[in-house]
Image: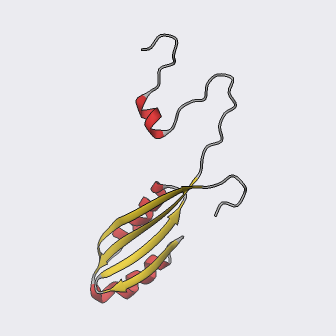
Amino acid sequence: MLTGKREIDRRKFLTGDILPERGAAPARPQRFFHISSAVVTARPEQRAQIARAIAALPDTEVRAVEGSKIVVVMEGESSGEIGSRLTTMALMDGVFSANMVFEQIEPLDDSGDDR
């Protein structure tokens, strides 16, 4: 421990969960916009039905269907939300796998226009 300085917890530092200095105004939590793409591998004879079920999920779009592959784009406010939707796809009947291939995270501005 350093004398005269406050000790910072490594986990809190890595997750960005550090408390403001005493007397400082609390910072507004930063919100983020996540966009991810995934490839779902499904039974070829069920791909149209599975693609329709995936497209019915909130903030989810089917971009391409070819052979046993379904390319999906998802939007959300957290990686957990995206991951949960990906798990939902992976558990659908006829789906062999659902794998995220890309994720981009952008901060939302505080102007009131969230998207």
Q: Nearer the viewer, residue 86 or 14?
A: 14
How many numbered circles does the render carry?
Answer: 0
Q: Quadrant of residue 92?
A: bottom left
Q: Position of residue 97 (x, y in %)?
A: 29, 70
Residue ID at (38%, 87%): 48
Q: Is residue 45 above or below residue 95?
A: below
Furthest residue in direction top, as rendered: 3
Q: Is residue 6 above or below residue 104?
A: above
Residue ID at (46%, 33%): 13
Residue ID at (47%, 20%): 7
Q: Position of residue 101 (x, y in %)?
A: 35, 66
Q: Is residue 53 left or right of residue 27?
A: left
Q: Position of residue 89 (x, y in %)?
A: 38, 70
Q: Is residue 79 above or below residue 36?
A: above
Quarter the C terminus occupies? bottom right
Q: Work out whether residue 45 can be spotted.
A: yes
Q: Position of residue 67 (x, y in %)?
A: 29, 87
Residue ID at (70%, 61%): 113
Q: Is residue 81 left or right of residue 100?
A: right
Q: Nearer the viewer, residue 90 or 68?
A: 68
Q: Work out whether residue 87 can be spotted.
A: no
Quarter the N terminus occupies? top left
Q: Quadrant of residue 19?
A: top right
Q: Is residue 54 above or below residue 17?
A: below
